[in-house]
Amino acid sequence: MIGGLAAADQALVQRALDWVSPRLAQHSTSGGETFLAHAFGSAQILTDMQADTATRVAALLMLTPVPDEASAAKSRASDPISEKFGAEVVQLVQGTRALSRLGSFASGATQGAFDSIDQKEMLRKMLLAMAADLRIVLIRLASRLQTLRWLAAEKRPCDPMLARETLDLYSPLANRLGIWQIKWEMEDLAFRFTDPQRYKDIAKLLEEKRVEREDFIAQTIEQLEMGLKARGIVSEVSGRPKHIYSIHNKMRSKGVDFSELYDVRALRVIVQDERECYAALGLVHELWVPVSDEFDDYISRPKPNGYKSLHTVVADATERPFEVQIRTRAMHEFAEFGMAAHWRYKEVGPRGVRAATGQQPAVAEYDRQLAWMRQLLAWNTEAGTQSDEPQPSKPRRVTQDRIYVLSPQARVIELPIGATAVDFAYHLHSDLGHRCRGARIDGQMVPLSTPLQTGQTVEIVTTKSGGPSRDWLNPQLGFLASPRARAKVRAWFNAIELAQRTTQGQALVEKELQRLGKTSVNLEQLAQQLGFARADDLYVAAAKEEFSLRQIDALLQPVVPEPELRVEDLMAHAMRAESVTAESKSNVLVVGVGSLLTQLARCCRPAPPDAIQGFVTRGRGVSIHRSACSTFADLSKHQPERVIEVAWSAGTPGSVYPVEVIIQAQDRPGLLRDLSEVFARLRLNVIAVNTQSKASVAYMAFTAEIRDGADLQHALGALGEVPGVFLARRR
């Protein structure tokens, strides 16, 4: 327990042991192990891991009785652990107790809360997040391994939940941190309790004891190192026998029999470059017999996740197969800490391996922390093995940008740092967030703006109905830290506003229809006729004054039928019958008829110098159309006898003609004003305006009085230069 420590540190560990012994001797765990034996065994495991002095001392003190809250408040200044062993040890002890409480809470929760792979992964992340100091995780792992060791040594039954939790939580965590000696032992012991018969079957299939297998590995390493050295290859050769749980997993995942497993024993060779990888491979195949179809070159053909290595299976003189992996140091670092780390495809499965471009920020940060922790552990081990002198301490704090809290059903929820109970509620369900009115954290009522901390249990107090408060969107009040929750609150208020505008617009449209006496109109069809996809869109546009109700009037007003009038009736108005050309009030000459009533058609609004044609109407004289007018074309096709030849007269000073100009522009404040200023500058009188806005585009129709075509062209050119206008044309 004091190995590898300086004299002063050895004295501190011994003082801790002497101080804690009488305080733990009379207490036992639920499994029957005494607190003192558990603390001593955990500290010894940490000693084997080359842990520092504070970590070993904290392991001895972690089970000391915790004073009640009243006593703790009075004696906080005189905490005996702080006085005797310092603030650093106190922090480690408190952190270890917090993780222990989390484990107890999870064990007491419903089993369904941890059935999913995602929830198991969240619990591992939560454990890491609670342990801002890496040494707290090490103490917790050592404590769990000591429990399993004691139960196995005493042949005591193990709680199935404890063994299952070891395989689902602690063993994968040790694997990710690269603490292999802890990982394999915990897995084997937990597997021994969860499936004792299968454990015994595999143990028998191995046909040799673990010590014998380790001796085989040691002899093989020595033989390979001598061969590499003889060829001038600088290398690092390591190996370890496969443990029972690993063999069970491979047989189950690959669906193979024990006899088909070639990597029960395995070596790893690390060299300097790729050339030496292939040189080492040649040596391996010279020393031992290669097994056919069991060679993989992941250097020339890397795996999709970027993993590179040479894998081969060979057999010794006694036909015992074993696997050899050969890689460079860079390949090894990538395999251990990069995207191809073993835990990604062994624990999470293929879905756990994400392309670098698709990795979520929170996941990337979590992986970065794991890599940092593993490198720190490697430094600790290296420092402990190279020298017995005390090493300078390195910072072990881990920064976090996520927190992990628990629901009352022990479901782990991941939130951004600074998140509140409102964020928590919206993460679970939008409706729960809308009805959130209070929160309990670890059983205590707290304000909704209270920031949550990792490891807390959060319970939401709701009302039967209602919605969020607008105060929640005020960042200064601190109710929301999650963009996702903030978006849901905004969506709620947007939906309320949309419903209000829809109701308001519907009332306006229905009132207009009542005025027109058209209460039986199909509103959906009416909306489509007006250019809207749905009636609700029409209502919203009307409420926002983006649509003129006059357009409903124009659409629904019936056309007054023209009375019948014979051509002879028109001729009666002529002042002379001879063939003359006369001028009418509309400045249009009707060939062959004088003083004949004429009017400019509203469908095409002709103006000089347009080519025009006349059509004799019933009771309204001659209607003057532009020659290209579609209405005139339809009329002349069905009643060609009514077509009459007309032409523009010289006109009288001041004569003007109404022309309709269509404008399409990007809707913006002041657009109508700018367009009106163009007409005013050109001294053109505007007698009618119709405007509508849809999807940020303004559709406008101006009826202006012009003198001739030159006025029209000047107007269209000037209107097209107004900012935002992308179409200006005559209708």
Image: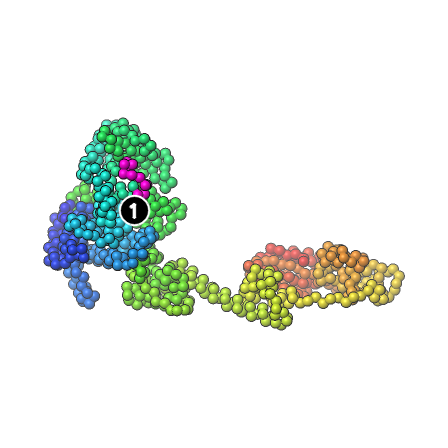
In the image, residue 542 sits, relative to residue 382, either above or below, namely below
In the image, taking residue 301 as reference, residue 32 lies left or right, namely left
Q: Which residue is mark 1?
A: 371
Q: Is residue 259 magenta?
A: yes
Per the rendered image, the range of residues in magenta is 252-262
Residue 441 placement: quadrant:
bottom left
| Residue 365 coordinates in the image, percent (x, y) | 33, 50
Task: Give the class, few, some or many, for how many residues have Cα within 10 Å of label 1's Cα (few <14, many ≥20).
Answer: some
In the image, 669: left or right of 702? left
SS category of the residue bearing label 1: helix
**Quadrant of the drawing holding the C terminus:** bottom right
- Res 563 quadrant in image: bottom right
Q: Is residue 570 magenta?
A: no
| Residue 191: image location, x then y, percent | 24, 47
Residue type marked 1: Ala
Q: Is residue 430 above or below residue 246?
A: below
Task: Please state if 329 lies on the left or on the right of 572 as rendered.
Answer: left
Residue at screen point 37% across, 51% down: 361
Evaluate whether residue 396 shows in this view. no
**Of residues 580 and 259, which is closer to you in this image?**
259
Place of residue 301 in the rendered image (x, y in percent of width and height, measured from the top left): 37, 35
Residue 305 in sight in this render:
yes
Query: Which sits in the foreground, 635 or 3?
Result: 635
Task: State which quadrant residue 485 falls in.
Answer: bottom left
Residue 420 spot, x, y in % from top left: 34, 62
Residue sitting at x 72%, y 58%: 631
Instruction: Name the residue: 65% across, 64% down.
Output: 555
- Colouring mode (rainbow / by chain / secondary structure / one colour): rainbow
At 26% from the left and 57% from the top, the residue drawn is: 107
